[in-house]
Image (cartoon, rainbow, N blue to C red):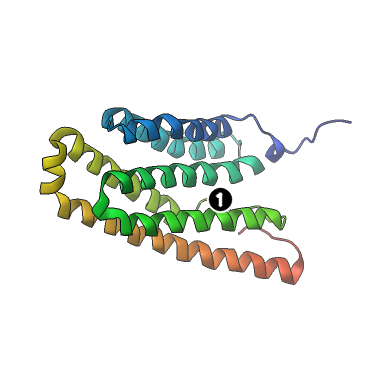
Amino acid sequence: MGQSSNPEDRIFTIPNVLSFIRIILIIPMTIFFLFRNYLGAAICVLVSALSDMFDGMIARRFNQVTKLGKILDPIADKLTLVAVIICIGIIIPNARILVAILATKDILMLLGGAYLIHLGITPPAAKWYGKAATVIFYVSIIVIVGIDLFGGAAASERYSLLIMILLAVTSVAMVFALIMYGVLFFRLLNEKKTDGKYIEQ
């Protein structure tokens, strides 16, 4: 039996390896956050963000878009986001309500993607609103970590309003992305019911 010649069936591609690296980075990133080694945490977040940016570019430029990649990329994103969100909630108690909103959003998206896969529907590639929300998230986290890293607890108290604004803006962006993905999710379900297949737009 020969292997499938469909390029989308490939597993070991550069973008997929980068997605695996992002998942592995969650472990040291979480440890750094919880032990308040913010420089180490910031480096992990930066590497994760850069790999997230470049894997999509590489996939499109070198024709390495795969079925696994379409699933793995958003999973790596969501797991990273949830891990950072939980860490921020532990470190900044006043932000826990916003953190709960963000965590709920990403968990719902993970469950929605898993349900689509269960139905035999390949989740769509990340959309601009999802990527924009991710960029806003990373910028906010880097600023928050930077405030604590260079100013300590006193700076975190002094800039608490700025931190809350950043988290609020991030929450709005995330909720907007969730709504847009929710619309897409139900459209895919409707297409599955009407014609039994999904043709990606």
Outermost residue, right side: 1
Residue at horizontal 44 percent and vertical 58 percent from the top: 104
Residue at horizontal 21 percent and vertical 37 percent from the top: 146
- What quarter of the picture does the C terminus occupy? bottom right
Residue at horizontal 45 percent and vertical 32 percent from the top: 27
- What quarter of the picture does the N terminus occupy? top right
**Front residue of 130 and 21:** 21
Crowding at dot 1, Cα within 10 Å, few <14 / some 14-19 / many 20+, comes out as some
For residue 151, which quarter of the picture?
top left
For residue 197, which quarter of the picture?
bottom right
**Whole-percent x and y of residue 144?**
23, 43
**Front residue of 177 and 7:** 177
Q: Is residue 101 left or right of residue 180?
A: left
Q: Is residue 29 left or right of residue 160?
A: right
Say what amino acid the circle numbered 1 marks.
Ala
- Is residue 128 visible in the rendered image? The answer is no
The residue beneath circle 1 is 125
**Whole-percent x and y of residue 80?**
44, 41
- Is residue 173 visible in the rendered image? The answer is yes
Residue at horizontal 22 percent and vertical 55 percent from the top: 164
Q: Secondary structure at mark 1?
A: loop
Q: Is residue 120 left or right of residue 54?
A: right
Numbered circles on residues, count = 1
**Whole-percent x and y of residue 137?**
34, 48
**Whole-percent x and y of residue 62?**
57, 33
